Image: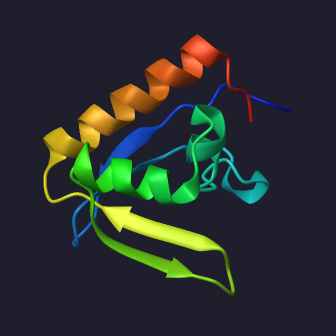
Amino acid sequence: MSHLLKYVEWESITGWHTGDVSDLPNGSNYWWHIPRMLNMDVVDYILMLKDKFHAIDFSYSKDKNVLLWQWKNYNDCHIFTRFVNLEARKRKYFI
């Protein structure tokens, strides 16, 4: 069953995070949903996260194909979350 991509924010001991956690076993939070939705190259996506949305602490596991990042403050995380959710609604991006 598919659903419209919908990000939510949460805080951990390291910082702020966002993602679609509604169906984790079926890949709702795969990092590549956003660059695919935006039709962006991966490098451009990471640069956008860093430069426009002030994301920090990037790490990537090639073996697991997992890209991680976070934010120092809620406001930057929230701005990105709102951007993603607006784009998902505009583009009708179902996962």
Q: Is residue 56 above or below residue 62?
A: above
Residue 44 percent coordinates (x, y): 46, 52
Q: Nearer the viewer, residue 45 or 9?
A: 45
Residue 89 percent coordinates (x, y): 56, 15
Determine the image quadrant of residue 61. Answer: bottom right
Q: Is residue 53 above or below residue 60?
A: above
Determine the image quadrant of residue 15. Answer: bottom left
Q: Nearer the viewer, residue 58 or 81?
A: 58
- Considering the image in quadrants, where does the C terminus appear? top right
Residue at image point 74% right, 58% down: 25
Residue at image point 42% right, 78% down: 59
Q: Is residue 52 above or below residue 30?
A: above
Determine the image quadrant of residue 22. Answer: top right
* Res 17 visible: no
Is 85 situated left or right of 92 in this image?
left
Residue 28 percent coordinates (x, y): 67, 47
Residue at image point 26% right, 33% down: 79
Residue 5 percent coordinates (x, y): 61, 31
Q: Nearer the viewer, residue 67 or 23?
A: 67
* Res 68 visible: yes
Is 67 situated left or right of 52 in this image?
right
Q: Is residue 71 above or below residue 33?
A: below
- Considering the image in quadrants, where does the N terminus appear? top right
Residue at image point 24% right, 51% down: 51
Number of numbered discs present? 0
